[in-house]
Amino acid sequence: MPNTDRIEKTIVLRALRSRVWRALTDAKEFGQWFQVALEGEFIPGTAIRGRITHPGFDLPMEMLIERIEPERLFSYRWHPYAIEPDVDYADEPTTLVEFRLEDVAEGTRLTIVESGFDRLPAERRAEAFRMNDGGWAAQLGNIERHVATA
């Protein structure tokens, strides 16, 4: 039976761990490859807000920063696939997004895990999972191109 609660994606980036870490944890740089304009910095225990800049999605976005363990782990919570402009998602559970880094011979292994989909309202759960599964696949390509050119 497929896992409906957790998305996991892994890529080996041909970049130093410090370079990948900066792309993940500098809010401005994160926004460049993730396609979101954020206001502020990533600080554990605080929320950061911004707007999605991906074509066709001019929507607000909020992330609650959970953990920052230098060059190893960056995590946040958010409302996945919260794209309906007239819906208030504030009372819904969030999912946890984790970025984990490891050195490998070819560069840096980045593993992205988003978990907690099974807690979402039933009417949104499957679509949020499906869209974020595809979204994370696309974001792997975005960060790969970003760290290769910067």
Image (cartoon, rainbow, N blue to C red):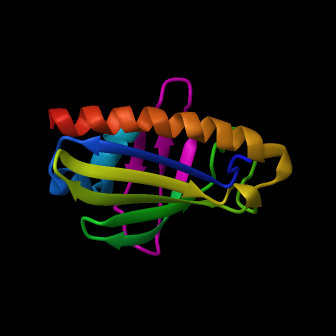
- Residue 130 is situated, as x and y percent measured from the top left of the image, at 66, 37
User: Is residue 35 visible in this depiction of the protein?
Assistant: no
Q: Quadrant of the C terminus?
A: top left
- Which residue occupies the foreground of this view, 30 or 115? 115
The correct choice, above or below, for 59 with respect to 110 in the image is: above
Would residue 101 be found to the left or right of residue 92 on screen?
A: left
For the record, the magenta segment spans: 36-62
- Residue 3 is situated, as x and y percent measured from the top left of the image, at 68, 51
Q: Judge whether residue 49 is colored magenta.
A: yes
The correct choice, above or below, for 58 with respect to 49 in the image is: above
Q: Residue 90 occupies which quadrant of the picture?
A: bottom right
- The residue positioned 40% from the left and 46% from the top of the image is 10
- The residue positioned 49% from the left and 42% from the top of the image is 51
- The residue positioned 72% from the left and 54% from the top of the image is 89
Q: Residue furthest top?
A: 56
User: Is residue 142 visible in this depiction of the protein?
Assistant: yes
